[in-house]
Image (cartoon, helix red, strand yellow):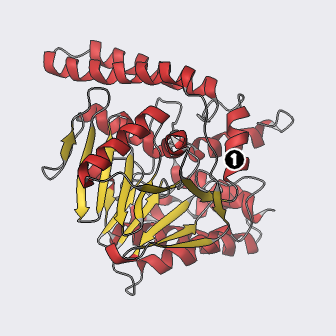
Amino acid sequence: MNCHITKATWFINQKNEIMRTTIFSIFSLFLFNIGFAQSIPADRLKANNDYPITVKRLSPKVALLTGRLWHVNSLVIVTNKGMVMIGAPLSKNITQYYKEAAEKEFNRKDFIYLINTGMGIEDIGGNSAFKDKTIIGHVNSSKEITKGKEDTLNKLDYLCLPNRIAMCKDQVAHLEKYRDSISNKSEKLLYTAYINTWKDLQNEYFINKEILTPNLTFTDEMSLDLGDISIQLINYGYKSSSSGLFVYIPEESILFTGQIVNKSALPGISFNKETPKNIVTNWISILNKFTNNKIELKYIISLNGGSDGIYNKEVLSEHYRYIKLLWEQMQQLKNEKKTLGEIKTTLKFETKFKEFGNLNNSVFPGTPWEILNIHENNIESIWLLLDK
């Protein structure tokens, strides 16, 4: 964080930084607190004494894998040319457990690609488990990973080793406090297992410190022809990082959206001084592509939440309509020379955006990830973009 900015600018940037972080990871932790490892009956738990993985087959060629910590999702696709994994959760060891679960599920071990859909620790923390494979990501990945590993001032950036250690300690303290407040013995045992996994992860970070950068990169779009399956990578960018991707598998009618969309909350918009001014129009164009009637989507999947992270096109359409409406209204009011305060008053969520009232407009109160008004943060973020 730049120490030479005004207090007002710092406050806006700090709120935007909170919006930028792994919001869906913490949402998954919240889900954990109200119901341990909830999953639908079709899911199967792959036995692993160190780290159990829940597997849900979406088709003969695709499986959704979910781990214990933060319920991070990874998608595995088997093709004529080899296996592909989307996401490398948290650490080398944990990602290795995901790989092993996939190998058991499909009875094959021929991984050829790992795809990074963003720069969160849930997506790239285990890249080193694919050290001898091709890791695909956006061209900005290397720069962002290097910056994140060195950014000790940003306490919410878990690519930095000290912050990863602190994250584990915080999770242990939080869960121990909750465990000690409950009386049910079986529930206490479940939380103890979860706590021990966080402790194991903390110990691993002292050993497996390396976060590899992708060795195959692209700018806007990239297509993989794998014979019976094709995979399209589309840079969405500037949500949790400038390297955020949509991954589309047309033959399976599956769209993996990473951290970009959460079905239960308003989409969080976050920009910084490096954000290109056309980013929102790019978002609108991409979302329009995947919400129109020309593309069939059986499954839309976010980075976190296990089976709860699967949603339908209507949810994606609602996020698209919200972003489009907010962008259009902000442009109009900015052209009318309205101040930021006037715009906030005019575009109150309860009046101008009440059609989206089923989506949460505040999350994580009382935590470091507290966002009491997502909509107002979005207005501030777009204001900064329009004011460039």
Instruction: Report whether residue 71 is seen.
Output: no
* Residue situated in front as seen by the camera: 382 or 349: 382
Instruction: Report whether residue 171 is seen.
Output: yes
The residue to which callout 1 is attached is: 144
Relative placement, left or right, of 305 versus 38 is right
Residue at the limit of the structure toward the right, as seen here: 4
Question: Where, by quadrant of the figure, is residue 197 drawn?
Answer: top left
The residue depicted at 53 percent of the width and 31 percent of the height is: 368
Question: Where, by quadrant of the figure, is residue 338 drawn?
Answer: bottom right
Q: Secondary structure at mark 1?
A: helix
Give x and y (percent) for residue 65: 32, 49
Q: Check the image and report above or below for 22 versus 225.
A: above
The quarter of the picture where the N terminus appears is top right
The quarter of the picture where the C terminus appears is bottom right
Could you tell me the amino acid type at mark 1?
Answer: Glu
Relative placement, left or right, of 262 versus 15 is left
The residue depicted at 61 percent of the width and 75 percent of the height is: 328
Give x and y (percent) for residue 168: 48, 23
Relative placement, left or right, of 194 versus 132 is left
Q: How many callouts does the rendering have?
A: 1
- Badge 1: few (under 14), some or many (20 or more) residues near its Cα, within 10 Å? some
* Residue situated in front as seen by the camera: 197 or 240: 197
Residue at the limit of the structure toward the bottom, as seen here: 294
Give x and y (percent) for residue 386: 74, 65
Q: Check the image and report above or below for 356 versus 335.
A: above
Give x and y (percent) for residue 70: 38, 37
The residue depicted at 62 percent of the width and 61 percent of the height is: 237
